[in-house]
Amino acid sequence: MKSFIAVFRTELIKTKNSFALWLVILGAAFIPFFFLLNHIYDWDDYLPKPGENPWNDYFRKGFNGTHFTFLPLLIVLLVVLLLNIEHKSNTWKHIFVLPVSKTKIFLSKYLLLISLIILFYCLLLIFLFSGGLFLSLWKNQFNFLEYRPSYFYASIHSGIAAFVVRSFISTLAIIAIHFWLSFRLKNLFVNIGIGLAGVVIAVSMYIPHWPSIIYLPYAFPVLMCNFIPGAHHFLSDFHVNSLFFFFVIFLLSYFDFIKKFKG
Amino acid sequence: MNNIHKSYNSNELIIETKDLNFSFNGKHTILKNLNLKIEKGSIYGFLGPNVAGKTTTIRLLLGLLNYPKNSIHLFGKELSKCRIEIFSKIGSLIEQPSLYEHISGYDNLEITRQIRNISKKRIAEVLRLVKLTDAAHKKVKAYSLGMKQRLGLAIALLAEPELLILDEPVNGLDPNGMVEIRELLKNINRELGTTVFLSSHLLVEIEKIVTHIGIISMGKLLFQGSIHELHNLQINQSELHIETSDNIAAFELLRSKHNAHKIGAALKIIYQSKEQVAQIVRELIGNNIDIYEVTIENKDLEQLFLQMTENYTVC
């Protein structure tokens, strides 16, 4: 465990001055910033009805903006940039001759990636929340100061925490696919191109509501737009599919990394 | 000249390959029956022209390419079975140094330090050793090629390894830098007993520091032995040139006994020893032949190396 923590710490060192870290921060600020500008510009369209908790609608719309194409592309870019650090620096060969197991290298890179995605969600919530507070300070009619966001309990569409967990699960399939591609493909543009093509197909299937969209990994985050959870199950079909894709691809990529990948 | 293999006698072998063969996709043969034997405490120069198979050999030794089972032993153990234990004793530098250019030299060392669980003060020591203390906190992308090479060496030296595997370690260094690195390697070998395996395509770069040499060309080991054995081979390749008052008579006299040849106005004899020279002189004088000139034409090691590698063709 001690050596795993040491390897993870080295992964953190590698993110210093890298664009991956900035991508998380700027990516989390992007939608909340334009969402805020939109509220300022058309403020009278966004005023809540009397007695309505403004946070529910505010968060729902903010998350819709994030999930529709932005989140899957951001995830693709983040995975590619993180693993490209080793290709760009020609350092796979250095890592593989250090006295540490390849399992620890593989898992520490995954842990870093997951940590950055969790950081993205935290920052996204902070920026959205700050935007709401700012709007109420600017115009009291927004009523954000009168209510509290529904963090955990079910409101109109469920609490924020449950929504974020579902959103995260929806990204897992893309994470696994591009993690594998990223250590196998040196050319990051090919990798990004595959992700972009996947998202374009996902959006073109989402708009006409094709039923088979629940099997397309790139569509899973897009399906979180206006998501309404089922009454009995925490996860919808596409969440289950995302988990299934994740575990299968995670295992395949793990064995590829351990047995065949030499850098 | 081809296929000259010398084997060591008794010392513990740190690196041993047994009939190591390697080809890409089973077609293009890179290495043929390579039998490396590197003794503990030696500085082994692995010499060969470009594309001879040096880097491939090093990548195989470090498990960076797939290799046949039981063909590579390091510290007496099979590489695939004891990977982590073996790598904990090795510092390496392969081709260009593997460096994260977007972070500082210090952070590059810190990455290796964390994984190898070495004390922090060792970073300052190796930085001082390779003269990078002042540039430690600059981003590596601002480093010159020589500085990068020195940082790569510092990373290899960080854990005070028992075995250093260095692929062209003086590449990109200026003459002063080359001398410094040579001295550094010599000191490490002498003071810490570190075994050094270094590759080069230039004999002059390494002949002053190595104790043993392996010469490889087109994937085949042409010579392996101590530097003294190579010198002996060099001496055996030297020629004696003799000019006399009667070259025809001298040729007749020395032809059968010393395998003399006529070249122009002189005689050529393969040099064997000083005693052989004295004997030839005595024989000529004894037969009333005046000697105008006797010269020994030495082949230097570089010429010998070139002759070995140029003459060799794959069957």
Image (cartoon, helix red, strand yellow):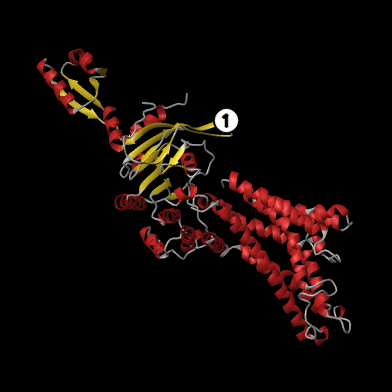
Residue B170 in sight here: no
- Residue nearest the observer in this picture, A45 or A116: A116
Q: Quadrant of residue A79?
A: bottom right
Residue, disc 1: B27
Q: Quadrant of residue A260?
A: top right
Image-quadrant location for residue A154: bottom right
Name the quarter where the N terminus of chain A is drawn: bottom right
Q: Mark 1 belongs to which amino acid?
A: Lys
Which residue is drawn at the image coordinates 83% and 86% (left, top)? A141
Residue in the picture at 29% in, 50% down: B190
In front: B184, or B68?
Answer: B68
Camera-side residue: A6 or A28?
A6
Residue at point 17% right, 20% down? B244
Q: Percent x, y for residue A37?
A: 77, 76
Residue B194 x/y as whole percent: 35, 49
Q: Is residue A106 left or right of residue A51?
A: left
Q: Is residue A220 left or right of residue B301?
A: right
